[in-house]
Amino acid sequence: MGLEFPPGFELGVATSAWQIEGDVEGRGRCNWDDFAEVPGAIVDGATGEPACDHVHRLEEDLDLLDWMGVDAYRFSFSWSRVMPEGTGSLSAEGLGFYDRLIDGLLERGIRPVGTLFHWDLPSALEARGGWPERDTAFHFADYAHAVGERFADRVDRWATLNEPWCSAFLGYSSGYFAPGRTEPGASLAAAYHLILGHGLAVERLREVGARNVGIVLNLIPVVTDDSRMDAAVQHVDGLQNRLFLDLLAGRGVPSDLRESCGSVTDWSFVRPEDDTVLSAPIDWLGENYYSLMRVASPDGAAAEAIGQDTAAFPACPPLRFAPRPPFTDMGWEIYPDGLELALRKATDHLPGVPLWICENGAAVEETTDADGIHDPVRTQYIHDHLRSLLRSCDRGFDVRGYYAWSLMDNLEWASGWTKKFGMVRVDPASGNRTPKDSAHWYRGVLASRTGA
């Protein structure tokens, strides 16, 4: 298939808890449950129940992973399933579910890769102010310790956070994601406290013997063809990428952001004594790559690209996002070569840290007939991004694995069921799973690589 992987290169798929688990009665409430009750917040009115009913269909989904032949499965723990109030007592039922998931993976020879936080904050902590409050970082560390204590002997790799940019800026600045707040200053505090929580969690995980501890970012290359927009590019890149990378690298908040965001925050939440915690050494860095951002003059029509919104960038100067075709259903430009730009940024800021592509995939149009579910754009998208990734490996980037997003159709956050990323179709009414052409193709890639 024209894809030659380095020895030991890991291939898998990824999902997240709120998007697939269902069984809302079996856990505490989270911010996304609350957000889903706000009229219009989720476009089709979808809620976390039943989602993909993964909790009740666990064995079926484990068998699906086994059929596909993946090396690893990246999933996320639901904080509110493990610790219903966000603090205090643990749920035996919730821990038991993850025991069954992890043991079921190991029985099938699949490496478990666990993410502690994929955007679903317990409602009780959101009611206390959420991530803009410093205490949330310490509660997160307690949760990380509890999960690590239970599962460190069996989980192969740990991510503290998934895409903290989304939690901070889509959640607290643009309000597009839960909790739906539009407070730019609070979003900057949230971003800082998310990385503080990450650093504290790294320490607590290692206390209980967790191995391979890292974090997953969504580094997005920001480019322009108009030199007049260079300052705008610098601002967007600063908030999207450099803020998180510099905190992780021990360089603190970038000085240009301190100045450009001074109109919305006094940065009083930043404490010099946090630097050592923020920059706790990590064993690996995950990158979720889908597209890039093209910045253009504010004159002209705004793009319809989900997440590419000036409201998500506090103190944003006048600009517009101008992606170019071809697009996915999310309005994102398909640009495989941008993957290397993201890898270069990661490597420049955190040299020597091994990289994994933890999400990559596309919501696309599909057709169904008697021969199956046809999604050729998705198959081509994944193929082309794998080729780009392998070229990057040939050029010296230390990338050790790739997880396609996603195993199955799921709740695409504020888009509900209207956007389909899965290689396996999930019927929202019946829950039935049906592999699409892309799933059969990816299975073939795995089999041809392993010689199976």
Image (spheres, rainbow, N blue to C red):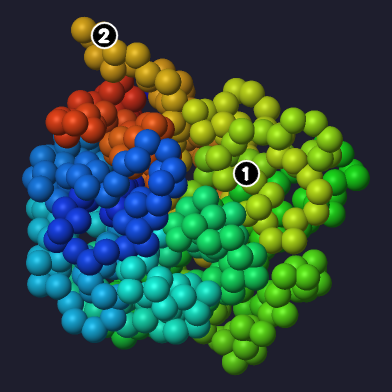
In the orientation shown, which residue stands out farthest toward the front?
Answer: 39
Q: Position of residue 427 (x, y in %)?
A: 22, 29
Image-based side of 23 in relation to 271, left or right: left
**Of the image marks 2 and 1, the number of the one nearer the N terminus:** 1
Residue 409 visible in the snapshot: yes
| Mark sitting on residue 369 | 2
What amino acid type should be assigned to the residue bearing mark 1? Gln
Judge left or right: residue 264 versus residue 206. right
Which class describes the residues within 10 Å of circle 2: few (<14), some (14-19), or many (20+)? few
Task: Label 1, secondary structure: give it.
Answer: loop
Q: Residue at x 21, y 7 (%)?
A: 370
Comparing 37 with 363, the one in front is 37
Circle 2 or circle 1, nearest the eye:
1
On screen, residue 74 above or below 365: below
**Residue 186 figure quarter:** bottom right
Secondary structure of the residue carrying tag 2 is strand
Q: Which mark is residue 308?
A: 1
49 left or right of 441 in image: left
Give the Cα separation between the discs numbered 2 and 1: 35 Å
Instruction: Identify the residue at image location x=15%, y=31%.
Output: 430
Give the percent coordinates (x, y) of residue 87: 28, 81
Q: Nearer the viewer, residue 446 or 86?
A: 86
Residue 215's label in the rendered image is: none
Vertical order, 360 against 112 (above or below)? above
Which residue lies at the image location 40% right of the left edge and 51% below the top edge? 38
- Residue furthest bottom in the image: 273
Q: Name the amino acid type tagged 2.
A: Asp
Q: Residue furthest top?
A: 370
| Mark 1 Cα-neighbour bin, 10 Å: few <14, some 14–19, many ≥20 | many
In the rendered structure, the answer to whether residue 78 lies left or right of residue 119 reads left
